[in-house]
Amino acid sequence: PVYYKYRGEALVIMNDQSPNKINENKEKVTCHTGDKKRKFPSPVFPSSSTSGICDGNVSPPSETINLINFNKCANNDHHDNNDVSKPKPKKKKTKHLNPQILDLRRTIQKCCATNDFNTAIQAYQTLHVEQEVTMEPQSFYNLLNLCEGSLGGERGIHIGTPKNSSNVVKTATAASMTPATSAEKSIGEKSRSKTFELAVKVIAGVDREEPKPSTVKYTPSQRKNYAFKIKDEMDKLEIPLNETAYTALMRILCQTMNNDLEQAEQLLSQAEQTQQCKPKLRMYSCLIDALCNEKNDNLSGALRVWSRMNQLERKNKHGTVQIAKIEPTEKEYCSIMKCAVRVGDVQVMERILSEIAEDVLIPSSDTKDTIISWFQSKHSIISASHTTAKTKSALNSVEKLPLFNAPSMGPLQYIIEAEDLKVGTCDENNVVNSSSILPRWEISVGDTIDTKNGMLQSGCLKGRLLKPVELNHQAWDNMIEMNEEIVVKGEVKAHGKISKFAGGGKGKKRLVPEDAVKKRVQQWDAFKSFLMETVGPPCNGTATTENKSNDRKKKFDVVIDGANVGYYKRNFVHAPKHVDYKQIDWVLDHFLNEGKSVLLFMHERHFGKQLMPKWAKAIVQKWDDSNLLYRTPHGSNDDWFWMHAALWCGRGTMVLSNDLMRDHHFQMLAHRSFLRWRERHQIYFDFGGWDGDKRKVLLTKPDVYSRRMQRVDGIGLCIPLPKRGDENRFLDGSHEADDSTPIEETYACINLNKTSEKNDGSEN
């Protein structure tokens, strides 16, 4: 049903597919919203229809009908008698506003829908400047966004489409397209209410007259002048600028012909000191793009902005300084890398390429093309005398950049000895003309691979093997520390208390009583004592199956997420609420028969009398007797326990779970390291056919190689390309590859060819 409100009465539109049945003889109409029930005064129905509209026998004027949300109608107009909570303060209704203020607001809102800057600025000049009509702060912010022109824009770096697209109202649209039933036809066209027709049009969106955008064009300089006049007016009225307004002004300055970048940096400093503005990446991204474009090529300036992002600190309302540093994404890395290619800064190129290799599992096409352009440029081959000269790099002029802990992707240049060069092959900067020498970089795109052993099957690196890429020791230690900090304190200190996914349990952050926090700390200390007594001191990722320290007592080969195994394929109708203890037991037996050391984690609630069936007691008792089970306490998330145990044990310890661990991914500051850890240490499972009284356990273990950018034989470079179905492999973790990408795994490869002749053909 779709609900309308008119003159205090509830107007209800029903269709034949609605689960709610309306009885004309009842005094109350009961409608369902989830698990709640609301009762409304029964309206009067047309006698000739069992599925029509309640219009009180009189069709109200169509222009006075307001479409409202049912939840809002239920919660605001009809309160439960049992609701004892304090009512929220009512907002000022639009009918109490000056009609001119309301008209100005609506005009600017409509202009935002079509990016009609001309109409919006005329309304501003006429109503606010000339007639002195009060303008609301939000209207100022909207107008500044119109001055900028892009209305937010798209980042446009990732391949594929967003995984979770925006939802639209489908039921109402479907209702408008559903053929009329016999009951509806009996009403006849004349008796059908105009209100119903209008409602269907509003729902389907066919009766909305969208304003047409103006054809008047404004230059960037004109938009800049208007924007800063509006800013001056806001300063005069003491209306603070928020992040959206500052971003719009920053983009305007970066888009003008003169690129007022100095003024943009001053505005950025002002934004960082404004309490009402919480800086976001887009504020810095537009400045980095402007500094790195072909007109400016200001590589040092772009690195300074990156340094500011790393040093960003903010004060809360209590005056406490909080760390709120912002990390660049692939888009910003790619902009800096393009600039480094043009100016030939090999140190910056190597640093950014190494950052991308560490942070991005699957680079975008734009990033891949930029990397290839470096090896096609004149800066990729130099003379030996050039390396001995003082090489100036933008990295040397910028301080306080993030610490560089990623493995280097260098070298990115091939050095030609002086005696091997011919006369005239170098320019005044000792840069070699690569077309005049025999050694050169070979590039091949779309190379295939044998997924069983990681051997490349085609291209310039054919026959070479890809290797597994593990976490470095510092990243491993950071993950252990962050995992414990989130569990004990509910957040990571470096998050600056700004992450909404910072709770010790799953989901959004919620307040935890002080007593509960103390209890959680005690439970966590008991868990660490268990690990110390059972395993020994924590490992920083250096221990392997061959390297056993004297301090380590036992190393678990597999850590099992018991709830994930027990609830696997248990979401059918009338499924029991408890986990399938037999499925868990099959998995345990599978690993024990292979001679593996196993530790099972399950929450304490799975063993309560009301949940666990009697037949499962013998199975659980077997786990306890064999010291295979660790019961996580109430008030804690069991996922953090098995993850910490796996990290504590070090390399070689695998995690069995089909969980993609998205809550871990967003809560942990080192989410990029987490993705790499998950790629190398997670085993997926399934169940096959029956083997006696058990089902076969089917495991999908990590590949013998890592599908990510890596060096091959010290000089070759291998870049993975997107394939269909890729998910959570991009930098922001929220995209997936669409159907336009190939279904097989392919790579772009770069290798130095020292033996080929100059005229032996072109690139592969």
Image (cartoon, rainbow, N blue to C red):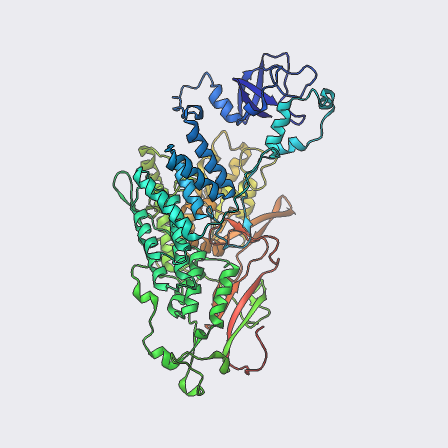
Residue 30 in percent (x, y) is at 57, 18
The residue positioned 44% from the left and 30% from the top of the image is 102
Q: Nearer the viewer, residue 60 or 332?
A: 60
Where is residue 443? Give x, y as percent: 54, 71
Residue drawn at (40%, 69%) of the image: 343
Rendered-image quadrant of the C terminus: bottom right
- Residue 630 in view, yes or no: no
| Residue that extends furthest to the front in the rendered view of this protein | 130
Asked if residue 217 is positioned above or below residue 200 in the image, the reply reads below
Nearest the viewer among 605 and 64 is 64
Nearer to me, 480 or 392? 392
Q: Residue furthest left?
A: 319
Q: Looking at the picture, how far across and down is residue 700, in whole percent?
A: 56, 54
Q: Does the rendering let one see residue 603?
A: yes
Q: Quadrant of residue 473?
A: bottom left
Q: Residue 646 at x, y = what percent?
A: 43, 51
The number of callouts visible is 0
Q: Is residue 392 left or right of residue 32?
A: left
Quarter of the figure that contains the N terminus:
top right
Viewer-side residue, 113 vs 699: 113
